[in-house]
Image (cartoon, helix red, strand yellow):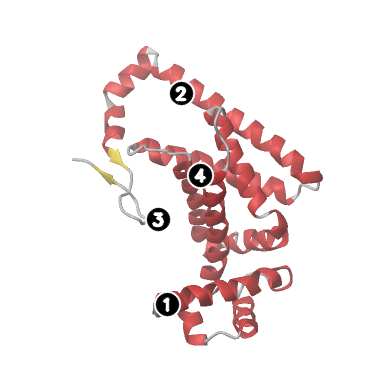
Amino acid sequence: MSEAPKTEADHIATTRDAVLDIAILNAVFDGWGEGALREAVREAQVDPGLAKLAFPRGAVDLALAFHRRGDTALAARMASDEMQGLRYSQKVARALELRIDVMADQRDAVRKAAAFFALPQNAADGARAVWETADTIWKGLGDSSQDYNWYTKRATLSAVWSSVVLYWLGDDSPDHARTLDFIERRIDNVMAFEKVKSQIRDTPMGRAFAAGPGRMLERIKAPTGPRRDLPGYVER
């Protein structure tokens, strides 16, 4: 059976992968700026027009492609990882450990990407990348929330993941052991906070809030469709 002809989307994806492979190798010297993109396109010997389609916003799309490749690898690792018998908090910690493992041999590229996304003009895209990692983890764990909890879970985990990355970048312990300990402490902090929230909900004040202003939260719904960067909606 003859192979189906490649579509433009296939050629764009191939171009994106080829340029990204070079950019990751060069990141320690070139970073993730526009010059890095031009050099990677040149070294990959790809069609400049396809490269423009692959990275329409230039360097920021190149850096996002790097981050998203890591999230794709994380999703695959989570699907095959043995998590039975773990408490839910342990599963979250394990997912963060797997994300660290995915980028363990790309520390310099990650460090340069962190600096790139810290620039004011790239901060929004950096926040989106962190959010997508949190979303990947919750989806991999089977999260089915469709209300405001969809947002709070991802916002909380985004904060945890950001701090984990910064800690890991400065961690020189064997097999990033100190980072793994740091992950456990952060997850413990989050679980302690959730416990306090639960206790407050059981107080007269908490019940009064739930019956009054808190009812508005029940109307907040998660976004629908394949787009993860769009806001949800409020039911009337």
**Which residue in the protein does label 2 denote?**
197
Disc with the residue nearer the chain's start (3 vs 4): 4
Determine crowd level at label 1: few under 14, some 14-19, many 20+ residues with C-alpha closer than 10 A.
few
Query: How far, Cα to Cα, is label 2 from label 1?
Result: 56 Å
Q: For residue 160, which quarter of the picture?
A: top right
Determine crowd level at label 2: few under 14, some 14-19, many 20+ residues with C-alpha closer than 10 A.
few
In the image, what residue type sits under mark 4?
Ile
Residue 137 got which mark? 4
**Above or below 101: residue 202:** above
Please give left or right for residue 144 compared with residue 167 in the image. left
Determine crowd level at label 4: few under 14, some 14-19, many 20+ residues with C-alpha closer than 10 A.
many
Position of the N terminus by quadrant: bottom left
Q: Are marks 3 and 4 in contact (CB under 8 Å)?
A: no
Percent position of residue 21, x then y: 63, 71
**Which residue in the protein does label 1 denote?**
3
Q: Secondary structure at mark 1?
A: loop
Nearer to me, 26 or 120: 26
For discs 2 and 1, the disc positioned in front in the rendered view:
1
Q: Are marks 2 and 4 in contact (CB under 8 Å)?
A: no
Percent position of residue 226, x then y: 35, 56
Disc with the residue nearer the chain's start (2 vs 1): 1
